[in-house]
Image (cartoon, grey):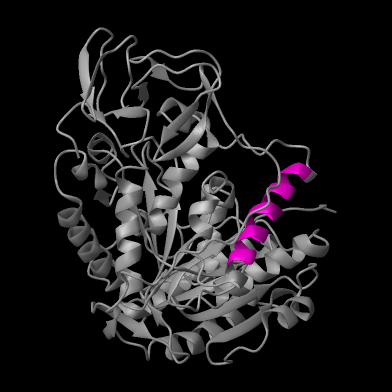
Amino acid sequence: MENNNLLLIQPNDNVAIALCALKKGSEQEAGGRKLVLLDDIPPAHKVALCDMETGSEVVKYGLPIGHTTKPVKAGEHVHIHNVTTNLEGLLTYSYKPKQDVWAGFRPQEEAWFEGYLREDGRAGTRNEIWIVPTVGCVNRTAEILAKRANERYAGIVDGVRALTHNAGCSQLGNDLLMTQKILKGLINNPNAGAVLVLSLGCENNGLEYFKPVLGEVDPNRVKFLVTQDFEDEYEEGMKLLDELAEYAGKFHREKLSAGLLTIGLKCGSSDAFSGVSANPLCGRITDRVVKCGGRAILTEVSEMFGAETRLMERAVSKEVFEDIVGLINNFKEYFMRYGQPIDRNPAPGNIRSGISTDEDKALGNIQKGGSAPIVDVLYYGDQAQKNGLSLLIGSGNDAVSVTNLTASGATVILFTTGNGNPFGAFVPTVKISSNTALSRKKADWIDYNAGQVLDGKSFDEVTDDLFRTVLDVASGRKQTKNEEFDYREISIFRDGVIL
């Protein structure tokens, strides 16, 4: 980091980021270039380092993030008033892999956490009983059962959770199938030591339709209850939960390799500091976990638009490269099918905080994936099974993408934010602030302050510290704020007709 008020991310960038609010007329320096500011520059916003004509490429992170819509002078504020996206429709890509995508990941590292080793060889970071409704109609039933079970099984398991949602009925075709696959993935998450699947009995996602999608399960770990079949569904539910608690209670924490971790990566309510502090810091954690033999999952496909070639070059094979192409173009077609432009990603909060275009956001977003080889492309409910970084289908919506990560087997989620968001998953969700001001303002939301790297600490020092925090969370030595305040939610992606 430069000891200055402006941060130049890459030497060839023609914009720099203000590390604090800067006044018009003040003299600043970035990358050896001195300039006088022609505008007030808010924190995290961009300032031009050179004169640019209309249509000039605006370069940040070493790549174009859009082009100017009017002439821009050195020292001017660069934002949505004078820059727009370069994005267009479907593109054709060429397979141009790096010579050795695993270079830098050998030899592997060793790190350890205290986790729950499951019978299928995977590991959980929590040992909970999950009550999963097949339909939203029995949400309250699930909550009542969870409350009674938490009182009865305190000390036996880490908790009993009701995974309530509003899906499972009045859905047709692929929309229903997506719901079924997400629920299947949640049921298979290794943080659930045992699962009660709770049905009403008349829904589109009734057990006769859901079980074929769910497939074979361990009857000791997963049990089913159709509430319409019993006079007292609570009495019957507690009987089944007694059996599930006995099974889950047999698991105890033991020393395990960090190679058994699966981390999910998410950013929400980002600012322009996210791409230079919190997200790159998560990328370093991704690389550490992968070097230990573990797995990481990166989602938010709409927030890859404009940065996808940097991901494609890290594909471990041509087949994976082609899967990434399909992932990107299929998600663009989703926008186009509804007559929506593909370049409307930065949300109002992102824009206020200095993110100007989709490419600006995307190049910051993918920093969470570090430099790890991309080994797989996952669809709804698919489980991450390979050492390396997997890309997961899904939108940038916070609740939807965190749900998708949990359904694909993430047992800890690293969630970066620049403006703050209390939302959390049913797995520990480590909230990482991009700036120190947010960590102080929202201490009940934030678990870790990545703004330390903007304040002068080295990335190496902060990476080691955050990795220890992640291992502490995985080991149950530390609760995340979403656990402490019980922010645990799911939101299932919907794309279809509702009857």
- Where residue 246 sits, quadrant-wise, is bottom left
In the image, residue 51 lies at what x, y percent?
Answer: 40, 16
Compare residues 484 and 378 and report the one nearer the observer. Answer: 378
The quarter of the rendered structure image containing the C terminus is bottom right
Does the magenta run of residues contain 324? yes
In the image, residue 356 lies at what x, y percent?
Answer: 48, 29
Residue 77 vs residue 96: left or right? left
Residue 313 vs residue 450: left or right? right
Residue 402 vs residue 319: left or right? left
The secondary structure making up most of the magenta span is helix
In the image, residue 64 lies at what x, y percent?
Answer: 48, 36
Q: Is residue 201 visible?
A: yes
- 214, above or below 45, in the image: below
In the image, residue 26 lies at what x, y percent?
Answer: 22, 11
Going 49% across and 86% down the picture, which residue do you hit?
Answer: 244
- 52, above or below 186, in the image: above
Does the magenta run of residues contain 216? no
Per the rendered image, the range of residues in magenta is 321-336
Please tell me how many numbered marks the rendered image carries: 0
- Where residue 222 sits, quadrant-wise, is bottom right
- Where residue 477 sits, quadrant-wise, is bottom left
The quarter of the rendered structure image containing the N terminus is top left
Going 54% across and 37% down the picture, which residue do you hit?
Answer: 358
Compare residues 261 and 188 and report the one nearer the observer. Answer: 261
- 350, above or below 38, in the image: below
Going 14% across and 46% down the picture, which residue do you hit?
Answer: 457
